[in-house]
Image (spheres, helix red, strand yellow):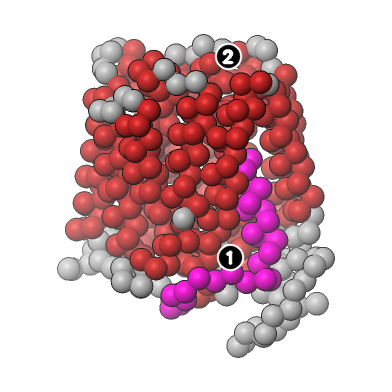
Amino acid sequence: MRKHSWQSPYTLLILMSVAMPVAFSTWNALLNNFVVERAGFTGVEIGILQSLREIPGFLAFTVIFVLLIVKEQAFAVVALAILGIGVALTGIFPSAIGLYCTTVLMSTGFHYFEVLKQSLALQWFEKSAAPQALGKLISVGAITSLVVYSVLWGLLEILDLDYTWIFMLAGGVCCGLAVFMWLGFPRFESRHEQTRKLVLRKRYWLYYALTFFSGARRQIFMVFAAFLMVEKFGYSASQVALLFLINYAFNWLFAEKIGSLIGRIGERTALSIEYAGLIIVFTAYAFVENPYVGAGLYVVDHMFFALAIAMSTYFQKIASPEDIASSAGVSFTINHIAAVVVPATLGLVWIVSPAAVFLIGTGFAVCSLLLSQNIPFRPQQGNEVIWGRIEEPAEPGVESVR
């Protein structure tokens, strides 16, 4: 293939950042209304569905075994196609079993893709440029979601299009973009040959701990904050789409700027701001009674997601370059240990006390804030933590920083 100027790794990541939200944002925006209106779901069924959705994330470490025979770039494109197929099939099976099956299929593509995209971005971007570049990718995904939610609102409110057709349209677009990426781009090589085995290093322990609590906390937002809007406040599908529209407008406007800010203030400060803010937001969720205040909390909660770039750049700074692909899979698995258990378990808690669910989220945010204080102001290999440094055999060319 003759390579043109637009056929670059950065362009490919941009297209990937467009394709994923076309499918996933549609699924995410319509899911709660679809399962309540067509399948009669309660908090128990939605909790089970969301736990099943996280099983592929829990198994994300298996990506390293697939990479023994398939290159990362090719695997990422295939994963996008699987995501699109799963979303396209969602509206055809409006039953508990059908939704569980299509959700697992969709989630398999989504989680493998997210692992691979993060790995490729950290390999292709220089450390100094990574925060702003990752912020740019979030902005691209956000503006795509912005367009998606605008289109959804029109399809639902103006054309009154059925859920089934909307799911098929979104999944089909994602699959079409995956085909274009497969045929339209050469295979790019990484600057560092990646380790083709599972890597779980003691010196990365703080990153693993932050990742674990991030997974637990994020599930409460993804599952129950959105469900609160529908079940407690009676938001319609078009109103939920409008709420997501506001969320992604903020991400589009500010994500790249937040990435640049992280580059200036450092990972420790950025994560401290995120976790302190989430403590306030989750506590407020527990007692909110006004639907407009609830919507405001949802928007603020979503805004903090961009600060999570700091976790990725912290890991990029402390990790050996050849560990990135393997560690991306391992970190996703750690992220989803809690994610597999939390939705189903807290679905039962929800029946008794929705407030208790969000107060548990406050507890997770407190744990994250305490852990973030152990991040050095200048993290790098050999200077991964302030307290609890675990020595490992020195790696070639790496000096330990005291």
Q: Is residue 196 magenta?
A: yes
Q: Amino acid at mark 1?
A: Gln
Q: Is residue 18 left or right of residue 353?
A: left
Q: Position of residue 156 (x, y in %)?
A: 33, 16
Main SS, magenta residues = helix
Residue displayed at 38% across by 42% down: 104
* Residue located beneath label 2 in the image: 232
Which range is magenta?
Answer: 192-218
Camera-near label (1 vs 2) is 2
| Structural crowding at the residue carrying mark 1, measured as other residues with C-alpha within 10 Å and reported as few (<14), some (14–19) or many (≥20) | many
Residue 158, placed above or below residue 100: above
**Element under disc 2:** loop
Precedes in sequence: disc 1 or disc 2: 2
Task: Examine the image and state in which quarter residue 151 appears.
Answer: top left
Report the residue that reaches farthest toward the left: 1
Q: Give the total number of marks visible in the rendering.
A: 2
In the image shown, does 264 or 17 lie closer to the viewer? 17
Residue 147 visible in image: no
Q: Is residue 14 left or right of residue 316?
A: left
In the image shown, does 245 or 66 lie closer to the viewer? 66
Q: Amino acid at mark 2?
A: Lys
In the image shown, does 399 or 38 lie closer to the viewer? 38
Q: Is residue 294 left or right of residue 75?
A: right
Q: Are marks 1 and 2 in contact (CB under 8 Å)?
A: no
Task: Examine the image and state in which quarter residue 62 appears.
Answer: bottom left
* Residue located beneath label 1 in the image: 316
**Element under disc 1:** helix
Quadrant, the N terminus: bottom left
Residue displayed at 43% across by 75% down: 196
Q: Position of residue 320 (x, y in %)?
A: 57, 75
